[in-house]
Amino acid sequence: MKDKRTNKCIAPEVGRLLTQYEMGELSDEEQDRFEGHLMDCDFCRRELEEMLPIITAIRRHKAEIAKALHSKGTSFKSLKRQLLTPRQTHRVKTRSIEYTRGRVLTWFKNTGKLRILLPAAVVVITTLFLFVTLLQHPKSPYLPYLSFQRLPYRLEKLRGEEATQGEQLFHQGMNDYLRGNYKGAINSLKRAVEKDPNNGIWWLYLGVCYYLNHQSKRAIEALTKADALTQYSQKVRSRWYLAQAYLLQGDADRAIPLLEWIRGQKMGYSAQADSLLTKVHPIIR
């Protein structure tokens, strides 16, 4: 049952998983459970949405931040252990961002390393940069060469009462997609493809959302289905993102044939595929 108030989580025993969800630390079963919770809980959904603008800014400066932390001997593993200490299950005391910032600042004060994170703006960025780092694949040597540009989409008007439930879910998901809320989009698009599992375009955008959210395994699954179901022009797009998802996972052997095929089409992403191939080949030799 939904709680009309939006200043607290409606199911704290599930909402307490918020930090672990943001950091990609949940099992598939726990993630599915939490994503189902997001459909009903305005509080937790707002928590995730508030993170998006900050995460976008962090991605632009992640190299500088990582270098500064590394030069001072700061360990992300230590931070991770601190952040993943379970919150009390009977209630959610604070918002995720405030909670996380407080935990990290306390850690730095206790270890005498706060001086390296001044001014205060860097403290906030460093704190939230941790989320992005843990959601990505730092072991993949191809990460610096990947493009995380959004696949263009023009939002179309629904046909009122004629729209199917699947179309309504897709429309809702693409609203979130265009706002940069990829987790919210994933929730709706997953339900949309359940209604119509043969719609290749829906699978394509679901796969793109997973990729933009650095969930390579799920991106590969969705984009493989999109590749099988879409026509030629959309197949080029599907394979472009599929190739990058493989590289995000560190699997160049599966990415290279896709990139070579795209390059040979002389359209769409051919130039980008050629450029990416010139960067990938030296690494695998």
Image (cartoon, rainbow, N blue to C red):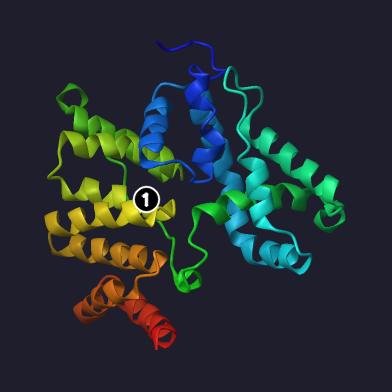
Front-most of residues 143 and 147: 143
Classed neighbour count for the residue bearing mark 1: other residues with Cα under 10 Å, few (<14), some (14–19), many (≥20): many
Viewed as shown, does residue 156 lie left or right of 163? right
Q: For the image shown, how many numbered marks are present on the structure? A: 1
Measured along the vertical axis of the image, is residue 1 above or below residue 13?
Answer: above
- At mark 1, the secondary structure is helix
Q: Residue at x 73, y 62 (%)?
A: 69
Q: Label 1: which residue?
A: 210
Front-most of residues 268 and 43: 43
Viewed as shown, does residue 149 lie left or right of 65? left
In the figure, residue 102 lies in which quadrant? top right
List x then y, in percent, for residue 250: 40, 69
Examine the rendering and report whether any part of residue 73 can be seen: yes
Measured along the vertical axis of the image, is residue 75 above or below residue 281?
Answer: above
List x then y, in percent, for residue 181: 45, 41
List x then y, in percent, for residue 214: 44, 55
In the figure, residue 53 lies in which quadrant? top right
Q: Residue at x 62, y 33 (%)?
A: 96
Measured along the vertical axis of the image, is residue 194 above or below residue 199?
Answer: above
In the figure, residue 264 lies in which quadrant? bottom left
Q: Residue at x 40, y 10 (%)?
A: 1
Quadrant in the picture for the C terminus: bottom left
Q: Residue at x 68, y 52 (%)?
A: 78
Front-most of residues 177 and 218: 218
Viewed as shown, does residue 126 lie left or right of 171? right
Q: Amino acid at mark 1?
A: Tyr
Examine the rendering and report whether any part of residue 151 can be seen: no
List x then y, in percent, for residue 199: 15, 45
